[in-house]
Image: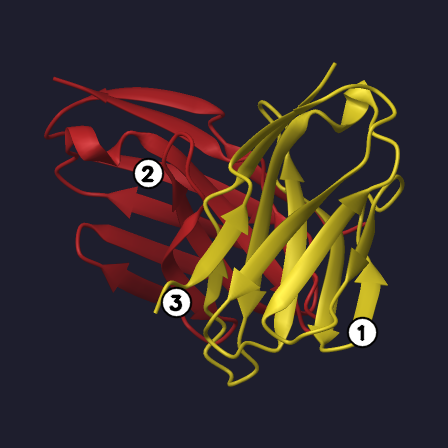
Amino acid sequence: NAGVTQTPKFRVLKTGQSMTLLCAQDMNHEYMYWYRQDPGMGLRLIHYSVGEGTTAKGEVPDGYNVSRLKKQNFLLGLESAAPSQTSVYFCASLGADGAYEQYFGPGTRLTVT
Amino acid sequence: KNQVEQSPQSLIILEGKNCTLQCNYTVSPFSNLRWYKQDTGRGPVSLTIMTFSENTKSNGRYTATLDADTKQSSLHITASQLSDSASYICVVTPDAGNMLTFGGGTRLMVKP
C-alpha cells in the first residue's frame, strides 16, 4: 500500500513549456485534490475531483487543467507555464467512508524560469 | 469568505518544554477540523481530526481542543522533542462539500 504518490518529484520548466503532473493513489479513494503551496502561505486548492470522470475548480484554477480518467489517477496539466506557477504542488486523496482522513503525496517542486 | 487564521506564525521553544498553537476560523457550519504536521520538504500528515461535536482529541503528546461556540481550536504539544520541529496546519472542512480551508500554518522550531 503506497498511499499517494506523485511524479515527478522535481521539474524545471522554461516559460511557455507544458507539462503534466501525475498523482496516483491505491486506497480506492473517491476524492482527489491538487494544491499548491507557496513559501509562507497555506495550501491553496487548484482543482479537485469527487469521482472518476468528474473535476471541479478550486480556489486558484487559472492556468491549470486536470483529468480523472481512472479512479486511482488525477493528472494536473500546465499548458503554458509561467514563473508565477513556481511552487510546490501537493496531491491528496480522501475516502468517502466518513473517516475524514485525507492523505497527501510527497509533493512536486516545480520551478519555471 | 471562509477563513482559517493561525497564531503565532512561528515559534521557537527549548526541547522538553510545552507549547500551544492557536487556530481561529470563520467557516460555518463546519463538518470537521484537522491538525496536520508538515515536515520540511514533505506532504502534510494528519495528527488529529475532530467533528463539530468533539471538544478534545489526543494523539500521543499532541492534544487538540475545539470550542465550536467561539470558533477556536488549539494544539498543545507536551514535552517537545527535536523531531517536533515542523509546520503545523489547521484545516477546516465546511459542512457542505469537500473543499477544505487551510490555515497558513505555525512554524515550530524545537532547540536543544
Quarter of the figure that contains the C terminus of chain A: top right
Quarter of the figure that contains the N terminus of chain A: bottom left
Disc 3 marks which amino acid? Asn
Q: Tell me, yes or no, whether dots 2 and 1 are on the same chain.
A: no
Q: Label 2: few (<14), some or many (≥20) within 10 Å? A: some
Instruction: Look at mark 2 in the image and give the residue it sits on.
Output: B20
* Callout 2 touching callout 1 (CB < 8 Å): no
Instruction: Look at mark 1 in the image and give the residue it sits on.
Output: A54
> How far apart are labels 2 and 1 at the CA level?
40 Å
Q: Which chain is yellow?
A: A
From the viewer's side, name the closer residue of A81 and A105.
A81
Q: Residue furthest top?
A: A113
Q: Chain of mark 3?
A: B
Q: Position of residue B99 (x, y in %)?
A: 70, 61
Instruction: Look at mark 3 in the image and give the residue it sits on.
Output: B55
Q: Position of residue B45 (x, y in %)?
A: 39, 51
Q: Is residue A86 left or right of residue A105?
A: right
Q: Earlier in the sequence, mark 3 or mark 2?
A: 2
Residue in view at x 27 percent, y 34 percent: B19
Quarter of the image where one finds residue A83: top right
What's the mark number on residue B10? Answer: none
Disc 1 marks which amino acid? Thr
